[in-house]
Amino acid sequence: MSIVKRNGINFRELVLVDKIKECDDIISFYFKDKDNKALTKHKPGQFLPFQIQTEEPKYKGVMRTYSLSMVPNENMYRISVKKIENGLISSYLHDNLEIGDIIEAMEPAGVFTIKESSKNRPLVLISAGIGITPLLSMLYEESKKRDNIYFVQAVQNSLIHPFKNDVLMICKYKNLSNTVFYSNPLKDDKEGIDYDFTGRINKEWIRNNLPLDGDFYFCGPPAFMKALKSNLIDLGVKEESIYYELFS
Ligand SMILES: Cc1cc2nc3c(=O)[nH]c(=O)nc-3n(C[C@H](O)[C@H](O)[C@H](O)COP(=O)(O)OP(=O)(O)OC[C@H]3O[C@@H](n4cnc5c(N)ncnc54)[C@H](O)[C@@H]3O)c2cc1C
């Protein structure tokens, strides 16, 4: 039976079926139900709370949450994890969790999801770094239904540019706007070829390139989100059109 009870809470046992390196410090982990039962289909933007199944005291009962980074489905969950220096669980996942290992997960949760009111407005999805995970899931799902999507990704350079090909393929195939910023390009990273703009997403660029009557969803480091929100408000975007997720 894939359900285990811990302190009165039901957890579903998931088995790791694949582990794929996305870029320098990010690995994606693919999980299935241990008994191959159907999973709860998540809403794009939701996260998976879980704990590792281990007897080691320092990990036992330690919960973490990771956004589900793939198209919603009942067969498989994917999370994509950035390894944090001295980070307890991100390091464990990168270095110790192997195919066949079990984690104990709660149901997908979270309210950072596409709102009903956003359905008829342009949709702007902006990420920095590992903050791409919930937005990628939104991109997979929403691109099936509409073409008024603007996807903006900010990373440091090509070494840590996760999901470059996935985003390129979806946006090219669906004819969606896709812009990549590198804040710190490598010597061989070519602006206009490997990425679009050097530097950070700024107010001027937003004014000239994004629909200010759209709904904005974003995720990234706190400083990025603070600056972005402040720029959007300055440009007249209404607070009720701004949605974001903090990874802390
Ligand atoms: C809604 C949500 C969604 C998320 N989605 C993702 C996702 O998709 N991908 C992703 O990679 N992450 C995601 N996160 C972040 C993730 O949940 C973890 O917080 C992250 O992986 C760090 O966990 P950890 O156990 O590795 O680090 P922790 O052990 O919790 O450490 C975190 C930081 O604290 C420092 N630290 C630890 N112990 C000490 C100490 N004793 N003294 C000083 N500093 C210390 C570490 O160096 C590290 O910088 C998400 C978080 C939330 C809330």
Image (cartoon, helix red, strand yellow):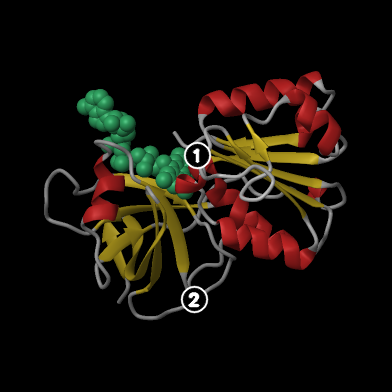
Q: Is residue 41 above or below residue 206?
A: below
Residue 30 location in percent, x, y?
Answer: 41, 67
Residue 13 location in percent, x, y?
Answer: 32, 67
Tag shown at residue 187: 1
Tag shown at residue 75: 2
Residue 85 location in percent, x, y?
Answer: 28, 36
Q: In the visual, does 192 lie left or right of 42?
A: right
Ligand 1: quadrant of the figure: top left
Taking the spot 28% from the left edge, 38% from the top edge, the residue there is: 87
Taking the spot 33% from the left edge, 45% from the top edge, the residue there is: 83
Q: N-terminal of the two: label 1 or label 2?
A: 2
Q: Three-letter amino acid code at disc 2?
A: Asn
Element type at mark 1: loop
Q: Three-letter amino acid code at disc 1?
A: Lys
Residue 45 in view here: no
Q: How far apart are marks 1 and 2 (CA)?
A: 42 Å
- Crowding at dot 2, Cα within 10 Å, few <14 / some 14-19 / many 20+, comes out as some
Taking the spot 38% from the left edge, 49% from the top edge, the residue there is: 24
Q: Is residue 13 above or below residue 81?
A: below
Residue 21 location in percent, x, y?
Answer: 39, 60
Q: In this view, does 38 lie above or below 228?
A: below
Residue 124 in view here: yes
The image quadrant that residue 182 belongs to is: top right
